[in-house]
Image (cartoon, rainbow, N blue to C red):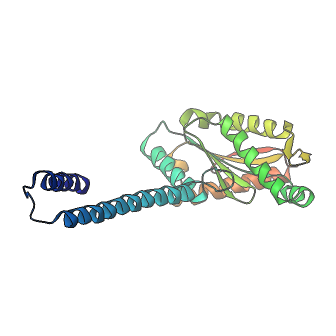
Amino acid sequence: MLLLANTLWLITGIGDTLTGIEIIDLPPLTWLGSFVVTSTIAWVLVLHIDGLYKERRTLNNQLMYDHLTQALSRSFMEVKLNEAIFQIQSSAKNRLAVCIFDVDNFKNINDSYGHSSGDVLLKNITEIVKRHLSPSDYVARLGGDEFVILFSDYHSALKASDIVEQIRQTIASTVFKAKAHTFSTTCSFGIVNILSEEDLAEDPAHDILSTADEALYTAKSLGKNTIKSIGYHD
């Protein structure tokens, strides 16, 4: 509207000058100066609004994604997990599986090859996991070298153990490269399966993650590079 008004103002000012008939009772320098000032203000407002949108998009990305791996952030994964829990509570056909995993001997990789190599490894592992997931499933970084996979789709939750086994095998058979270093690694996985609403406790999101974490430590105690899959109350 400001630009439209200024354009009209400019046209009338030009008409004043060319015809000598004063449409607006202002001297030419006055309307020209006002036009410039108002246009400048309008342009500054446009730039400011555009900057606010960019800042909002940046903030949303920071809240939704881990800055290193571009997996989901922990807080956004909790949102997705609660959405999946709501779905299982509202449908008898729904099923849910959650997997927590981490890198075996990750500290040794950092100590031997440097933290930058560890960062490259985490990025590559995230990409491997994403390639095995359906669009309705999610991977998030909990912190350090620990990740969580949410199988929120009924069909992928049924096949969660098979999908995780494919991920385990792919990671174990991959040679990772970071700068001048090449190395291999393995991961250990703990899976918890939610079969119905009856499996959910009073604080389901916290309890599901805790149970999956316990399954992960069981997998570690079995020798690492392995999977421990349990039912929610096993």
- The answer to whether residue 201 of the structure is visible from this angle is no
- The answer to whether residue 50 of the structure is visible from this angle is yes
In this rendering, the answer to whether 92 lies above or below 145 is above
Question: Front-most of 48 and 77?
Answer: 48
The image shows residue 80 at horizontal and vertical percentages of 52, 50
The image shows residue 183 at horizontal and vertical percentages of 90, 46
In this rendering, the answer to whether 29 lies above or below 71 is below
- On-image quarter of the N terminus: bottom left
Residue drawn 20% across the image and 67% down it: 30
Question: Front-most of 161 and 83?
Answer: 83
57 left or right, relative to 228: left
Quarter occupied by residue 130: top right
The image shows residue 139 at horizontal and vertical percentages of 63, 47
Residue drawn 81% across the image and 36% down it: 169
Question: Front-most of 71 and 6?
Answer: 6
The image shows residue 103 at horizontal and vertical percentages of 80, 51
Question: Front-most of 180 and 199?
Answer: 180
42 left or right, relative to 91: left
Quarter occupied by residue 127: top right
